[in-house]
């Protein structure tokens, strides 16, 4: 069965343009605002949405996303509420792929089989679980694939050619290339190095390769778009939410919409001009 993620990348390939993948944290700064932001993302230019599952002890997230997770948890966000947010989003959008991103602990507590079943029923399309290496595929990756969800794996600058086949073995949907060594949103990627890494990964897989960790501006997004099948932006969007949150839901939606439109223009404009 073809997933929304696979369908979306096929559409983008036909259009000869890269994807803009946007990350937001479920429940940040509150449940209603987070849902309003999520609903606004596709019209602003987001092709896929990564929805963070708040967790108290993240290991790959930079300060901005850490604070977003803590705000969400403080506002009462739970994994069940996150799945409900996806279900509500699906009432008005049947096409935009949604990938849940986070850590295994909340899923383990929820129950893997129950989680896979409920995630699929709510309209989730894929998972990114950053603390489950390939050696633990039996824990979640394989049940997710069997349940009809894509399982997106991270490759990093330290993933060499000996390790890469193991990383890619059960990966589906797309490959997420982490452009820097370290945590999210703390350094800018080197477009030349990213390009070489993307080509190396493509020598091992036919899956699309999307690049994230450190992309914050339209110019950076445009530079990465020339090298990859997609650009992932998270910390910059989460920071815009944080700054606008004291002014209410509409201010948050307006701030995110303006930023995502700029990122989409940078991503698409450069690619289309090159074509």
Image (cartoon, rainbow, N blue to C red):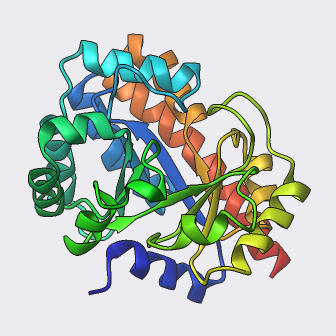
Q: How many marks?
A: 0
Q: Which residue is found at the position 71% from the left and 67% from the top?
A: 162
Asked which quadrant contains residue 96, the reply is bottom left
User: Residue 261 placed where, x, y %?
Assistant: 58, 49
Q: Is residue 96 visible?
A: no
**Horizontal side, residue 96 vs residue 115: left or right:** right
User: Residue 260 placed where, x, y %?
Assistant: 56, 46
Q: Which residue is found at the position 45% from the left and 26% from the top?
A: 58
**Horizontal side, residue 165 vs residue 48: left or right:** right
Q: Which of 126 and 251 is in front in this view?
A: 126
Q: Which of 216 and 112 is in front in this view?
A: 112
User: Residue 82 placed where, x, y %?
Assistant: 21, 39
**Horizontal side, residue 49 vs residue 82: left or right:** right
Asked which quadrant contains residue 121, the reply is bottom left
The image shows residue 30, relative to residue 128, as above or below, that is above
Q: Which residue is found at the position 45% from the left and 34% from the top?
A: 254
Q: Which residue is found at the position 57% from the left and 89% from the top?
A: 14
Residue lying farthest to the right in this orientation: 192
Q: Nearer the viewer, residue 49 or 275?
A: 49
The image shows residue 260, relative to residue 43, as above or below, that is above
């Amino acid at each position: 069965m073809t997933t929304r993620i696979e369908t979306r990348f096929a559409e983008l390939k036909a259009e000869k343009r890269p994807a803009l993948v946007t990350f937001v944290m479920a429940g940040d700064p509150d449940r209603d605002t987070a849902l309003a932001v999520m609903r606004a993302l596709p019209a602003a230019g987001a092709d896929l949405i990564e929805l963070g599952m708040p967790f108290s002890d993240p290991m790959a997230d930079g300060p901005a996303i850490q604070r977003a997770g803590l705000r969400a948890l403080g506002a009462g966000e739970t994994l069940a509420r996150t799945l409900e947010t996806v279900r509500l989003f699906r009432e008005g959008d049947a096409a935009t792929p949604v990938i849940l991103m986070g850590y295994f602990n909340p899923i383990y507590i929820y129950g893997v089989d129950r989680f896979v079943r409920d995630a699929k029923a709510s309209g989730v399309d894929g998972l990114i679980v950053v603390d489950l290496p390939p050696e633990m595929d039996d824990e979640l990756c394989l049940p997710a694939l069997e349940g009809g969800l894509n399982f997106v794996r991270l490759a990093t600058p330290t993933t060499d050619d000996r390790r890469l086949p193991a990383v890619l073995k059960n990966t589906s949907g797309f490959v997420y290339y982490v452009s820097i060594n370290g945590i999210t949103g703390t350094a800018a990627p080197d477009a030349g190095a990213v390009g070489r890494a993307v080509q190396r990964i493509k020598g091992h897989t036919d899956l699309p390769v999307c690049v994230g960790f450190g992309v914050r501006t339209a110019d950076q997004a445009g530079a990465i778009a020339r090298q990859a099948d997609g650009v992932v932006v998270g910390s910059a969007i989460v920071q815009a939410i944080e700054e606008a949150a004291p002014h209410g839901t509409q201010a948050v939606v307006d701030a995110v919409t303006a930023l995502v439109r700029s990122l989409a223009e940078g991503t698409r404009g450069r690619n289309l001009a090159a074509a």
